[in-house]
Image (tube, helix red, strand yellow):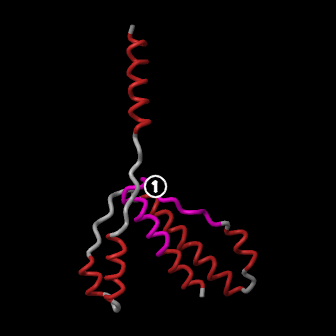
Amino acid sequence: MLRVALAGVGRQVRANCLASTRGLAEKAVVPELDWSDISKIVVSEEGKRELASLRKAYEEIMTYIRSDPGPVEPIDWDELSKNSDAPEVVKMFKEAYSKIEFPKLDDSMLKEFESEFAQLQKQAEK
């Protein structure tokens, strides 16, 4: 059961990472888990072993995310569709992905700060 949860966490973390590196931010925003609270819930020895395995895998994913700031390769939709058991799902994801629009930041404040900085710099040079 925990392995299924791990797979879901891995997919979610990767999705968050991809979304954040595609233009919104340089760093992925992933919530830190409170492992002590989670471990209080698990009582069986097998569950504790699975939780330790989950924690190790989660830490490996987080280490990878934090260490790999490089650009993300474009998605090869044809290859995904060819290798998938459900190409119609890949098609749905492709359609949804193509409709994502990232908000443009209003940089009017930056222009204002740049002009103020230029004035201050001129005053400092006098």
Residue at the location (71% across, 68% down)? 36
Q: From the viewer's perspective, is 81 left or right of 17? A: left
Task: Please state which of residues 83 and 117 is positioned toward the viewer in this rendering.
Answer: 117
Along the line of sight, the residue nearer the viewer: 45 or 85: 85
- Depth check: give the residue in front, 121 or 72: 121
Span shown in magenta? 11-33
SS at circle 1: loop
x, y percent for residue 120 = 43, 18
Quadrant the N terminus occupies: bottom right
Disc 1 residue type? Lys
**Residue pictured at 34% horizontal, 92% vertical:** 85
Q: Quadrant of residue 48?
A: bottom right
Measured from the top left, where is residue 67 in percent x and y? 43, 58
Q: Please tell me in which quadrant of the rendered image residue 38 appears.
A: bottom right
Residue that mark 1 sits on: 27
Q: Which SS type dominates the magenta stretch?
A: helix
